[in-house]
Image: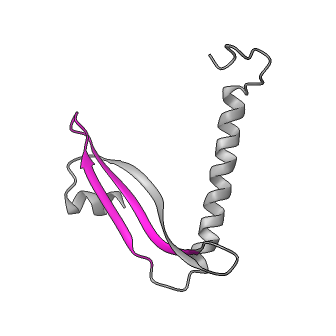
Amino acid sequence: LQKEGRPNNYVPGKDTVARDVKKLYLAAKEHLAKELQAYEYLIPVELDCWSSPNHRAFMSVMIHIFRNSDENGAEELTAVLLDFVELPCSHSGENMAEAL
């Protein structure tokens, strides 16, 4: 489908895409770990749970940190998604704690 209308365009294979995505993920994870180790403030953690229409429970884990937004050192509050998990049961406090 990607080559329709532009048959000369290069389309990477699924293995190449998978490898590149994994590299990007690992680099971003390492960068975030270093950033959080140097962070000087408390880090608020946000849990958000919901159920899908087919009754599957999910939870997202986010943090909110200040990051430099420009060369002048201005800081901007940023939300960072750390994880997204399916809960084995309902989203009770006990199940949420176990999933963390």
* Image quadrant where residue 16 sits: top right
Residue appearing at x 44%, y 77% in the figure: 43
User: Which percent across, then down, holds residue 75?
Assistant: 56, 78
Q: Using the image as rendered, state which of residue 18 and residue 73 is in the foreground.
A: 73
Q: Quadrant of the N terminus?
A: top right
* Image quadrant where residue 71 sits: bottom right
* Image quadrant where residue 44 sits: bottom left
Q: Using the image as rendered, state which of residue 99 and residue 50 is in the foreground.
A: 50
Compared across the picture, whether 51 is left or right of 34 comes to left
Coloration mode: one colour
User: Which percent across, then down, holds residue 28?
Assistant: 63, 58
User: Which percent across, then down, holds residue 14?
Assistant: 66, 27
Q: In this view, does 22 lie above or below 92?
A: above
Residue appearing at x 77%, y 22% in the figure: 9
User: Which percent across, then down, holds residue 96?
Assistant: 28, 59
Residue appearing at x 37%, y 61% in the figure: 100
Q: Using the image as rendered, state which of residue 23 and residue 73 is in the foreground.
A: 73
Does the magenta portion include 48? yes
- Residues drawn in magenta: 43-67
Does the magenta portion include 46? yes
